Structure formats: C-alpha cells, structure tokens
C-alpha cells in the first residue's frame, strides 16, 4: 500500500545501463536492490553522504549485498543516489565492487549533469 507521502525513486540512464550490464553476470541483482528501493520509497536515507560534489547535491553511497557471491556487503554493489528533494530520489549508478574500487566525485557530477541535461 502506497502512502501519500511516498518518495518517488527515479533511475538515471547510467543506472539503467549499469543494472542491465551487471544483471548479465549477477542474476539476483534486481531482487538484491529491490528492498533498498522500497526503503528509499518509505523515506529512509541509507548509506553515507559523499562530500565534495557541491552543496546543492545531496548524494549518498550505499553498499548492497550481492547474493550471487558469498562475500557479504563489502564485496557487493555500490549504489550511488541523489536526494533531489524530500520526495524524489534519483538512482545515479550502481557498480560491482569486483569491477571497480571507487567512483570519483567528478564522475558522479557528470552523471547528475547528464541527467538534468536530458531533462531540461
């Protein structure tokens, strides 16, 4: 049941492309991130805020367990999302920890800029 104050979760093109790419290797990725999306929709803020992007961007990094590999959260996915407003969250990108160690603030800024460039 959706409440009136449910948070809207949107997906950037980057997120959808990465999700598709990762889903070829990790069959469970969608079911792994579904509970995260549901928590975000309920207004829960998860993960750690990433600094250095700019005050106007409220961006978080979140570890998500990959159930296709038995190594716990630290070896799972990195999901980056932006709090656009109290009721809108934009999923920016997702990556597997085994593919890349970290994502730079410039790259996050580029994804955000691309998304708003396409919208405008």
Image: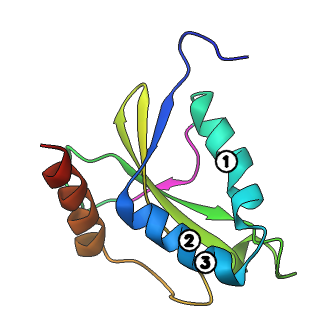
Residue 103, quarter of the rendered image: bottom left
Tag shown at residue 20: 2
Point out the frontmost of discs 1 and 3.
3
Under tag 2, what secondary structure?
helix
List the residue tagged with mark 3: 22
* Whole-number angstrom distance, CA of label 1 to CA of label 2: 17 Å
* Whole-number angstrom distance, CA of label 2 to CA of label 3: 6 Å
Q: Which residues are magenta?
A: 45-50
Q: Quadrant of the C terminus?
A: top left
Identify which residue is drawn at 20% across, 43% down.
56
* Whole-number angstrom distance, CA of label 1 to CA of label 3: 17 Å
Q: Are marks 2 and 3 in contact (CB under 8 Å)?
A: yes
Residue 33 in view: yes
Tag shown at residue 92: none
Point out residue 67 in the picture as x, y percentages from the top left corner.
83, 71
Q: Does the magenta-highlighted stretch encompass residue 16?
A: no
Q: Are marks 1 and 2 in contact (CB under 8 Å)?
A: no
Tag shown at residue 36: 1
Q: Quadrant of the N terminus?
A: top right
Identify which residue is drawn at 20% across, 46% down.
55
Point out the frontmost of discs 1 and 2.
2
Q: Does the magenta-highlighted stretch encompass residue 48?
A: yes
Residue 93 in view: no
């Amino acid at each position: 049941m959706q409440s009136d104050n449910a948070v809207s979760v949107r997906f950037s093109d980057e997120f959808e492309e990465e999700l598709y790419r990762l889903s070829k290797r990790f069959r469970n990725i969608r079911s792994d991130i579904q509970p995260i999306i549901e928590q975000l929709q309920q207004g829960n803020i998860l993960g750690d805020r990433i600094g250095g992007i700019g005050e106007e961007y409220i961006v978080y990094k979140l570890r998500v367990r990959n159930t296709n590999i038995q190594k716990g959260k630290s070896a799972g996915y990195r999901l980056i999302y932006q709090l656009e407003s109290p009721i809108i969250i934009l999923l920016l990108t997702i990556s597997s920890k085994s593919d890349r160690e970290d994502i730079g603030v410039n790259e996050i800024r580029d994804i955000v800029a691309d998304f708003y460039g396409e919208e405008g």
